[in-house]
Amino acid sequence: MNVERTPNLTPDSRLLTMAGIKLVTDADPETALQIAWRTAQDLGFKLTPVLEGAFCASKGHMIWSMLVGPAAPHCSFRIAAFKYPDGTDLVLERNSPWTSGLLGLRRIQGEADTLMERVADAVARAGCKVIDRKEI
């Protein structure tokens, strides 16, 4: 299968893949990533470009998360776009909180779900289609 990957991922970074959400859309990777960036920004995430075609979105503070656990979860998401012949995958990989337990994990999953729901809505408003959404 011929796959054009937008970000330059190293073999080591692929081993660190976290659970998350994948949207498949007919938007080009750059447009999908711009929509995700703006949506995350609107939801109060701190954004950091990490690679061409990828960025990190974080919310909360690691120290507070360690001190008060699930009451203040730290969200750290990596969002990347991958171009395939049948569409673009917009992938959100979320962190797994080792200090806040199951409740903290549910809150982080909720933040990820909200972000990707808003991204899917914004993709549709931009005139593109969301073909599929999957948990990964």
Image: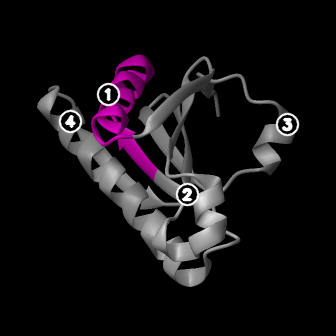
What span is in magenta? 22-44
N-term-proximal mark, 4 vs 2: 2
N-term-proximal mark, 2 vs 1: 1
Residue at the spot x=56%, y=82% of the render?
Answer: 102
- Locate residue 96: give its quadrant: bottom right
Q: Amino acid at mark 2?
A: His
Distance between mark 1 and mark 3 Cα atoms? 29 Å
Asked if the magenta segment contains residue 8, the reply would be: no
Disc 1 to disc 4: CB gap under 8 Å = yes
- Locate residue 30: give its quadrant: top left
Residue at the spot x=52%, y=75% of the render?
Answer: 70
- Tell which tag, 1 or 3, sits nearer the viewer: 1
Q: Which mark is residue 38?
A: 1
Q: Amino acid at mark 4?
A: Ala
| 110 relative to 94 in the view: left or right | left
Residue at the spot x=61%, y=80% of the render?
Answer: 101
Report which residue position mark 4 lands on: 122
Mark 3 Cα-neighbour bin, 10 Å: few <14, some 14–19, many ≥20: few
Q: Which mark is residue 11?
A: 3
- Locate residue 5: give its quadrant: top right
| 104 relative to 31 in the view: left or right | right
N-term-proximal mark, 3 vs 4: 3
Report which residue position mark 2 lands on: 74
Task: Label 3, secondary structure: give it.
Answer: helix
